[in-house]
Amino acid sequence: MRVEKKLEGKGDLKVRDHLIKLASESPEEEFDLDLIQTLSQYEEWKKNNQGKTYDDFLREMGLIRKKYNSGGDVEDYSDLIDAYEKGIDVMEGETLTQYIKRIRAAENQ
C-alpha cells in the first residue's frame, strides 16, 4: 500500500534560501566570496606564522596558483596582499578587497 501525503517543512528555510543565493552568484561574486574566505583563513594562519608571507601561506595550504606564460605583466594576488600589508598605495580605511579591486581596475585602464 502506498500513501502519498505532502509533508510540511520544518524551520524557516534560511539555509535553503542561503544555498540558493550562493548557487546563483555571478563569477565575479563567487571570486569575491572565495577571496574573502581565503583571506580570513590567511588572517588566522598569520597569527601563528609571524614573518611569513602570503606566498608561504599559499604554498603551505596547497592552494593552486596559475602561472601565466604570456599576455603581458600579471601581478599575483600574493604580491597585492603583501603590498597591502606593507601599506603600499593603500587608501585610508580601505579593505583588502577594495584595494585589490582598485589596483586591478587601474591596471586595466
Image (cartoon, rainbow, N blue to C red):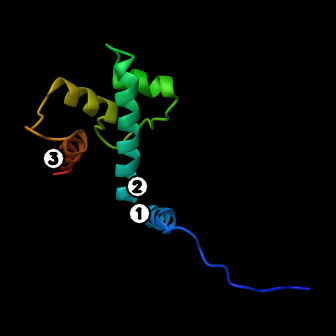
Q: Nearer the viewer, residue 68 or 86?
A: 86
The residue that label 2 is drawn on is 30
Q: Looking at the picture, does residue 101 appear above or below residue 42?
A: below
Q: Nearer the viewer, residue 91 or 70?
A: 91
Residue 14 position, x and y percent, is: 46, 65
Q: Nearer the viewer, residue 108 or 71?
A: 108
Residue 76 showing in the rendered view: no
The residue that label 1 is drawn on is 25
Label 3–label 1 contact, CB within 8 A: no
Q: Looking at the picture, does residue 98 appear above or below residue 24?
A: above
C-alpha span from label 3 to label 1: 25 Å
Q: Dot 1 surroundings within 10 Å: few (below 14), some, or many (20 or more)?
A: few
Identify the mark at residue 59; answer none if there is no mark: none
Q: Amino acid at mark 2?
A: Glu
* The N terminus, quarter of image: bottom right
Q: Which image quadrant for residue 71? A: top left
Point 40% across, 59% down: residue: 27
Helix or strand or loop: what does disc 2 sit on?
helix
The mark closer to the camera, 3 or 2, is 2
Q: Dot 2 surroundings within 10 Å: few (below 14), some, or many (20 or more)?
A: some
Helix or strand or loop: what does disc 3 sit on?
helix
Residue 76 position, x and y percent, is: 33, 34
Q: Say whether residue 93 is left or right of residue 78.
A: left
Q: Say whether residue 82 is left or right of residue 62.
A: left
Label 2–label 1 contact, CB within 8 A: yes
The residue that label 3 is drawn on is 106
